[in-house]
Image (cartoon, rainbow, N blue to C red):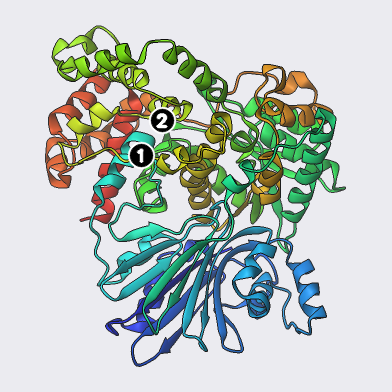
Amino acid sequence: MCGIVGFIDYTNSLNNNNTLLKMSKVITHRGPNDSGHKVWSHTNVTVGFGQVRLSILDLSSLGHQPMSYEKLTITYNGEVYNFKEIKQELIELGYRFISDSDTEVILKSFHAWREKCVQKFIGMFAFAIYDDNDKKVFIFRDRVGVKPLYIYQSKGLILFASELKSFLQVPSFKKEIDIESVSLFLQYNYITNNKSIYKNTIKLNPGSFMSIDTINNSIVQKNYWQAEDFYKSHKVNHSIDEVVNNVENLLVSASKYRMISDVPVGVFLSGGYDSSTLAALLQKNTSQKLKTFTIGFHEEKYNEAQYAKEIAKHIGTEHHEYYISEDDALAIVQKLCDIYDEPFSDTSAIPTVLLSEMTKEKVSVVLSADGGDEVFAGYGRYLSAPDKIHKIRTIPKQLRSIVYKTSQFLNIDKLNLDNYIYNFNSRSQKVLDLLNSNSALDIINVYDQNFSNYDMKVLLKGKLNSIPSRYKELNKLNSINELDKMLLFDYKTFLPDDVLVKVDRATMSVGLEGREPFLDHRILEYAATLPFNIKTEEGSLKYILKTIAHKHIPKHLLDRPKTGFSAPITSWLRTSLKEQLIDFVNPISLKESNIFDIDMVMHLRDDLLDGKRVHPQKLWQIFVYQQWYDRWMK
């Protein structure tokens, strides 16, 4: 696991080696064991690659990057777990190897099969290859988006990096805020739609690659894998027993691949179905005691540590746990805007960072069970949203239209009912948005919003012409049923842009490699062909995974309401984080950032500090943004 950086400079204005060193240095946490860089200077363009390395496979200097073979050079972040099989295939084609690294396998795979090589890879990756023959740069990102890759393009300069902070080391990079990205962040906790907080800066789409012809200064981006292609395919007609057996075999294969390492490996264990199933399957297939790790809260309603401990005892792992104090939270909050260098306000980032710090003391690689909910239907809204849209459709469309349009002439804020009914203004606007919904995705979108569309118009002082949509392209996929669209929506938005961002930055902030067995693309490719009702058999969410889990763990240890991995943010904002909140959210700092309606924000802040019932996530969003602005924009 590593961090990568690079540039394609048509202006020849960069201090080449120094630029690469600075871009790399700020992401040394991603790769503290080694670093390297290489520059190619041509008449019309200069190309530079840099890398910082966390040694996981082949710990020797033979894995040093950038790595070259003939006229090809690679800088790479990630793991290709099936590299040994691919290596054998290349040996049979006549290739010879000097290292035991997957980097060399990727490089020679590209030499053998060019862009098609990526179809052979099982893993997580972001890498760039420069072909000094054709003078082309190829940039790839893994199918799901486990590994990050940002690209900046403006006025003769292209930059790429694992984290945005690398771009800020380049004087010609312009850090202009993208207002649509601010809107996405405020409504959903994260920035999606392939966007970033800065203008002219994108995330490379998961499952895609970009080829850059430096002679013609032309760019082509193509998808090599899309989850929707498998949801479009015909559904299989397998029995429940066949499905459970097939999924378990795929999970065992995916987990075994992700245990391949030349350093110690552990597992995040929350005590829920996904992580418990993963830990049980792994422990069953090894003679050594697996190391498992969990974080607990002293606040009972957030705490699942006791369940994780019971499960660890049952399956026989070497278990480690740590309970978070408010002082711990305070220390992490102060680090968040450095770790997440664009606004990111999923509160579960706090325990995830602490869990990563604890885990790194024992191992260098950890497996996480993210993705089970999005692949196997684990969220309650997958059942409730279709029911809600059905009820809404029983109301005549004309009547719904009249109610919605009439509401536009009313100013709900002036009714001043927030003082009597908790969060009345936002909730009433959401009800109106629900009445205007035409699909289950509309329903999910409304429920996901921290701030309603109406709130956003006030909060951002009319800076937005329209509210950006997270799922416009999915609505065009008429060949996919509405139930599968919900799964696909979360798989392409919430999963890569929230969950995987959270885990990648948290683990890599301490030089810990996180691996995701549930996101092995073979699992999605099979699960997408299963009818939705199999995933929710007998009205049970995530029925397939639960059935597998119950084969290895007693049902009574697992069967409880889903808690989620969150934090008691309301009490923290009123106590240990109160001073920070006031420091960053006040009229002077709000005027300086020049994004928010100051009256609206101060009303939220003062109500929360006065002990009134308010929506804490709204204030947390603004607090996080203001912290980020103070750290990166001043």
Q: CA distance from mark 1 to mark 2?
A: 9 Å
Quadrant in which the C terminus is drawn: bottom left
- Residue 258 image point, x, y percent: 71, 54
Q: Give the answer, above or below, for where 312 lies relative to 300.
A: below
What's the residue type where badge 1 is placed? Ser
Return the disc, 1 or 2, that comes first in the chain's sequence. 2
Query: In front here: 100 or 136?
Result: 136
What's the residue type where badge 2 is placed? Asn
- Residue 299 image point, x, y percent: 50, 22
Q: Is residue 283 left or right of residue 344?
A: right
Q: Secondary structure at mark 1?
A: loop
Asked if disc 1 and disc 2 are in contact, CB closer than 8 Å, the reply is: yes
Quarter where residue 604 is shown:
top left
Q: Is residue 323 visible?
A: no
Query: In front here: 272 or 403?
Result: 403
- Residue 7 image point, x, y percent: 39, 75
Query: In front here: 364 or 250?
Result: 250
Residue name at image x 27 percent, y 83 percent: 13
Q: Give the answer, above or below, for where 424 lies relative to 526.
A: above
Q: Is residue 321 left or right of residue 47?
A: right
Residue name at image x 27 percent, y 36 percent: 622
Residue beneath disc 1: 469
Residue beneath disc 2: 445
